[in-house]
Image (cartoon, rainbow, N blue to C red):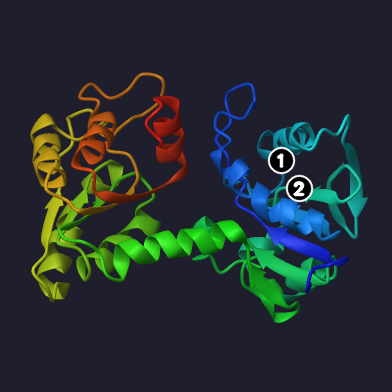
Amino acid sequence: AKVFGKTVFLRADLNVPLSETRSIADDTRLAAVLPTIDFLLKNEAKVIVASHLGRPVGIDKSLSLEPVAHWFSIKYKVSSIKYENREEFDGWKIGANIFLLENLRFYEGEEKNDPEFSKKLASLANIYVNDAFAMCHRNHASIVGITHYLPHFAGFHLEKEIENLGRAIDNPKRPLVVVIGGKKIETKLPLVEKMHKIADYVLVGGKIAEESQMFLKVRHKKTIGRKSVLLVADLTPDGTCITEKSLHNFLDIIAVAKTVIWNGSMGFIGEKEDKFQATRKIAEEIIKSQAYTVVGGGDTIEFLNRIKLLD
């Protein structure tokens, strides 16, 4: 009832992987926001969808959300999309009641959480809905600043993510094994430290293992209150994946897990995988263990979808 007939600013996570031809390589994140959009449309709301894509420095046309606009137009059977400007914001009109803003990170005020920029975003709508779980840790205008000016609610996908992650963290079946990989060390290190206090095993692989090995070992000794085992993988000389020995150590631990939280790959997962196929074998072992599993990370999700193991 609160959204009926209103204009809703919907912060979604549309940060999809793009191919060299700028086609969408994996649309999992786009599909995840559809239930919230459909609910709003059924309640005769006008929906302004907003997101970022990649890490542009200023305006970077290669990171435009235009491919996403075309994807939505197909889903909602709109014959054509119209590029237009709305209150100083560029974007695409998709049918009568959906407007997709251009990449928010093209605007300097987004990542700075600038109050004036937040007010401009808020001026577009009557209500704010956050359905971008993967962005909730960011102190950005479209996540934090806008909530000072509009009534705000969680979308269906955000609610579902919190419910599932809560099940894995609040009272997990043990052993709880946390597998953390990838390369974004600035966002992964706080995650590793947090999981130390919760998990029975923390397994660190991927590029962050090389960058954080000594740091994690020192911090581990100082911060762990409960009995928790930290394993930081060794990398191959070329740095493209964890070693075969480290992989087997990880697999042995995952085999006994009852709950697994996994974020980030163990090595290169492009079209040509790392020579030990570490990320694929991690996935296969998790499936075999039948542990309750929460998996995150855009590249990891895309890879699992590509090799048909996401289900």
Local crowd at mark 2 within 10 Å, few (<14), some, or many (≥20)? many
Residue drawn at 58 percent across, 23 percent down: 20
Q: Quadrant of residue 287?
A: top left
Residue drawn at 13 percent across, 76 percent down: 225
- Per the model, the C-alpha gap separating discs 1 and 2 is 6 Å
Residue drawn at 21 percent across, 36 percent down: 288
Side (left or right) of 43 relative to 169? right
Quadrant of the frame with the N terminus: bottom right
Q: Quadrant of residue 82?
A: top right
Q: Which amino acid lies under the numbered mark 2 shown in the image of this protein?
A: Glu
Local crowd at mark 1 within 10 Å, few (<14), some, or many (≥20)? many
Discs 1, 2 touching: Cβ within 8 Å: yes
Q: Secondary structure at mark 2?
A: loop
Indicate whether 221 appears above or below 275.
Answer: below
Q: Which amino acid lies under the numbered mark 1 shown in the image of this protein?
A: Leu
Question: How far from the left and from the top, in percent, is residue 10?
Answer: 71, 59
Whether residue 132 is visible to the viewer of this picture, yes or no, is: no
Question: How far from the left and from the top, in percent, is residue 153?
Answer: 65, 71
Q: Quadrant of residue 243?
A: top left
**Labels 1 and 2: the sequence-earlier one:** 1
Q: Which labelled disc corresponds to residue 78?
A: none
Q: Which labelled disc corresponds to residue 65?
A: 1
Question: How far from the left and from the top, in percent, is residue 8?
Answer: 79, 64
Q: Secondary structure at mark 1?
A: loop
Indicate whether 301 appears above or below 24.
Answer: below
| Residue nearest the viewer, comparing 122 with 178 | 178
| Residue nearest the viewer, comparing 4 with 97 | 4
Q: Which residue is mark 2?
A: 102
